Image: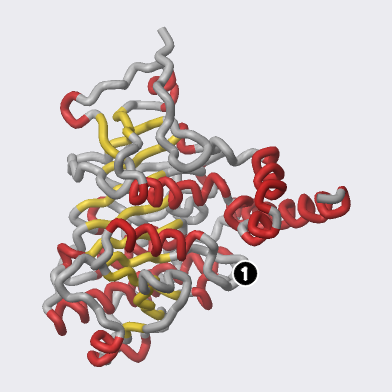
Amino acid sequence: MRSGGVLALLIWMHCLLSCYKVLATTETPATTTVNSIWRKTDFKDIESKFSLRTPEEPDEDTCYLIPGQEQSVGSCHFNHTSKTFVVIHGWTVTGMYESWVPKLVDALYKREPNSNVIVVDWLQRAQQHYPVSAGYTQLVGQDVASFIDWMEETFNYPLDNIHILGYSLGAHAAGVAGSLTTNKVNRITGLDPAGPTFEYAGTSVTLSPDDAEFVDVVHTYSVGTPDRSIGIQRPVGHIDIYPNGGSFQPGCSIGDTIRLIAENGIRGIIDMDQIVKCSHERSIHLFIDSLLHEEKPNMAYRCNSKEAFDKGLCLSCRKNRCNTLGYKVNKVRGKRSVKMYLKTNGQMPFKGNAIKITQ
C-alpha cells in the first residue's frame, strides 16, 4: 500500500474512532422515553423487521416473518420443531449491516443446521445520533417482545427454544424484549452490551438477569471511566465473562490493523468496520469461535478481579468456579452475578495457551 493510501486510511480510521469517542461522552439518559412505551403495540406499530435468514444465503434478507400475518411464517419455511436464534445488531454509522452479521448467521447454521436464525432489522433507528438510537432500543425491544408473544400465542411455539443474541445496543434491546414477553425466553446472550447512557441506568431499560431464564454476557471493551466506556463495565447477567480483563483485546492494536489490511488487500478494507471496532466486536467473534470450534473451548474462571486472575489465584473448577465461554456455557444461576476471566489468543481459534501462574 502506498504512503498516500496509508495516510488516507489512518485519517478514515481516526474519524470513525472519533464517532465512538463522541458516543462514549454523551450524558443523555437512556430512560427518557421509557414511560411512553411500556405497553404492547398493535402489529401495525411494529417498525422492526424479522428476517429469517437461510444457510444458503446467510448475508441476504430473502424472507420476512411479519407479526399478524400467519402466512408469512409458512412462506419462509419456519421450522416449528427446532430452536430459534434471534440476532439483534447494534448502532451503525453507515446504516447498513456490519460484516459480522452473516458470519454469525452462518456459524449458527453450521452448529444447528435445522434451526431458525432471525435477524432483527432496526437499521433506520440504529443509524441515528447515538443517544437517539440508544433510546430507540426500548421500542425495538417492544417490537421483539410482541413478535415473540405472537409466535407463542399463534403457533404455540415454545419459548424454551428461543435464544436471543444482542450486540452492543442490541444487547439492551434484547433485555427489554425479555422483560416484556408474557413468558420468559430460554436464554439471552449479551455481546459487549453498550456502556454510554446504560452504565448507571435502571434494569428496566438495560439487560439484566431477570430478562430470561439464563443470561450470559461477554465484555470485551470496557475501558476507561464507567460513564465513558464503549462496553458496559458492570455485570448485567447471571454470568459475566471478561476475556483478557474485558479491555483491549489481543490482535486489535494499530499495528495489527495495518498488517491485516496488507495481508488481505481489498478484503481487509471491506472489513474496516470490524477492524476499527476490533475489541468491541471481539465479543461476537468469541461466540462464533465457540460455535465453530467446539473441540477448543475457552474456559473462564470465577475471580474477584482481573489482577487476582493474572496472579493465578483463581484457576479452580470446584463448585462451579469455571465455565465455558459461548454457546455451550453451563447455565449456572446464582443469587448474584458471577464475574469470570480468561485469556485468549489474538485470532480464531481464540483458545489461549497455558496460563502462566505468578507466584
SS state under label 1: loop
Tell me the residue at 35%/91% (across/down).
44
Please tell me whether residue 339 is drawn above or below residue 141 in the rendered image.
above
Instruction: Residue 218 in the image: state x and y as whole percent.
Output: 39, 45
Please tell me whether residue 169 is drawn above or below residue 147 in the rendered image.
above
Instruction: Look at label 1 and name its amino acid.
Output: Thr
The quarter of the picture where the C terminus appears is top left
Please indicate, yes or no, whether residue 192 appears anywhere in the rendered image: no
Which one is nearer the viewer's eye here, 328 or 202? Answer: 328
Instruction: Residue 113 in the image: state x and y as whole percent.
Output: 27, 64
Is 172 situated left or right of 248 in this image?
Answer: left
Is 304 situated left or right of 259 in this image?
Answer: left
Q: Quadrant of residue 108?
A: bottom left
Is 183 situated left or right of 194 in this image?
Answer: left
Q: How many neighbours does mark 1 have within 10 angstroms: few (below 14), some (14-19), or many (20 or more)? A: few
Tell me the residue at 53%/77% (across/down).
124
Q: Which residue is mark 1?
A: 94
Instruction: Residue 122 in the image: state x and y as whole percent.
Output: 46, 74
Q: Quadrant of residue 165?
A: bottom left
Which one is nearer the viewer's eye here, 96 or 262? Answer: 262
